[in-house]
Amino acid sequence: MPIIMHVDMDSFFASVEINEKPELLEKPLVICVYSGRDEDSGAVATANYIARKYGVGSGLPIKFAKKMLVKTDAVFLPLRKDYYQDISTKIMRLIENYVDELEIASIDEAYCDMSSTKSFDEAGKLSMQIKEEIKKEFGLRCSIGIANTKVVAKIASDFNKPDGLTIVEDAVDFLSDLPIRKIGGLGPKAQEKLREFGIEKISDIRTFGKSKMCNLFGETLGTKLFEYANGIDDRKVLPHEKKQLHRIFTLSEDSRDIRFIHDNIMIAYGMVRDRAKKQFKTISLILVSDNLSTHTKSKTFDTMPSEKQVSDATSRLLSSFLEKNNDKLRRVGFGISNFYEQKEKSLSEYT
DNA sequence: CCCTCGATCAC
DNA sequence: CCTCATATCGAGGG
């Protein structure tokens, strides 16, 4: 049986800001993604625990958050993603020293294989060292879950927050009374479906049975969710390479002007291209209407497209969308996928 | 089997 | 009022 640890930083963005500005410690703190339409347009990325007590959390429009926090000394700060990413990378390198294998799951989360520790007890001791070193080096706290599977390790890291450490030896027992939403991949839509059958606890999924789960969600997802509910999950801890990369942003105003939109998409293309580490064959336009419905248009090339090819394809894809759809666009983005290794030039090509 | 595209998820 | 980003599935077309 493998031993798997899930590390989750506690209110990561907000904690980083508080470290630099200790006077924020006792105040509601809201980290915002400003869209630039006007003062205060945009959404909340995350909030500290004090602000969360007022109901402010990620996804909430900034204007709403401000209303909910009037009469408090709340502080609103812009998201500094690149800066947080630097710190995240350093933390990941620190963790890497302690474990057999590290899989970075997001900017503030990682799975680790610790099978060589041979016991939950040993893994627990190591995880306490990791927590201490992260606190000493970065002044940040994290919550850790340890179990035999990824799905349970992740639920365990969330079980006792902040600064928690939860070790799960009996996964089936641990899961039974937890609400089904704790299972990763079981979001609002799936919860709603299951609620119609009175399924609320994870143990209810076991009673419901695998075949009925498959009827509801299809073979792949149904089987997966049923197995997760039983603490079964054979996903390995492996560092993975990105399979896609995109950038999306809000236009300065809603628009159907093809030149204006094209220019903005090409700006997104520039940002994506600069971050790409590999060549790519597929490009995608992401088009969000003023009513917030999202559309994608993609094209796959035989080899890496030139800027001119990207620009031309973008024009075609965009025109075809605007012909079929009468919405104004609010946000646009550009993505790449289908990565491949840059082919080594043979020696003869240099001569 | 590959391409396109929407839906869903979780961040 | 409504950010930004990634992965995965399934359907439909070829």
Image (cartoon, coloured by chain):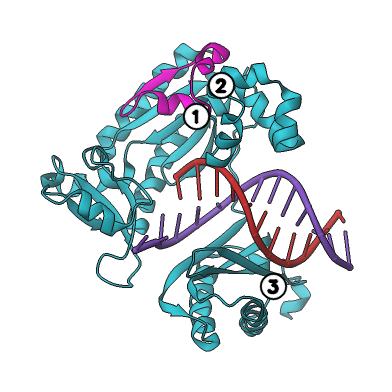
Chain colours: A cyan, B red, C purple
Q: Does residue A99 appear in this view?
A: no
Q: Nearer the viewer, residue A304 or A29?
A: A29
Above/below status of A322 relative to A140: below
Amino acid type indicated by mark 3: Met
In the rendered image, residue A336, in percent from the top left (x then y), is placed at: 61, 65
Amino acid type indicated by mark 1: Lys
Q: Nearer the viewer, mark 2 or mark 3?
A: 2
Above/below status of A331 relative to A339: below
Q: Is residue A187 magenta?
A: no
Question: Quadrant location of the C terminus of chain A?
Answer: bottom right
Q: Residue A304's mark?
A: 3
**Is the residue under label 1 in contact with that under label 2 (CB below 8 Å)?**
yes
Q: Secondary structure at mark 3?
A: loop
Q: Nearer the viewer, residue A80 or A31?
A: A31
- Residue identifier under label 1: A182
Mark 2: few, some, or many residues within 10 Å (few <14, many ≥20)?
A: many
Amino acid type indicated by mark 2: Ile
Above/below status of A54 relative to A350: above
Quarter of image, res B4: bottom right
In the drawing, does residue A264 fall left or right of residue A131?
Answer: right
The tag earlier along the polypeptide, 2 or 1, is 1
In the drawing, does residue C10 fall left or right of residue A31?
Answer: right
In three-dimensional space, the C-alpha distance between marks 2 and 1, rounded to whole angstroms, equals 9 Å
Magenta residues, start to end? A155-181
Q: Nearer the viewer, residue A150 or A178?
A: A178
Q: Residue A202's mark?
A: 2
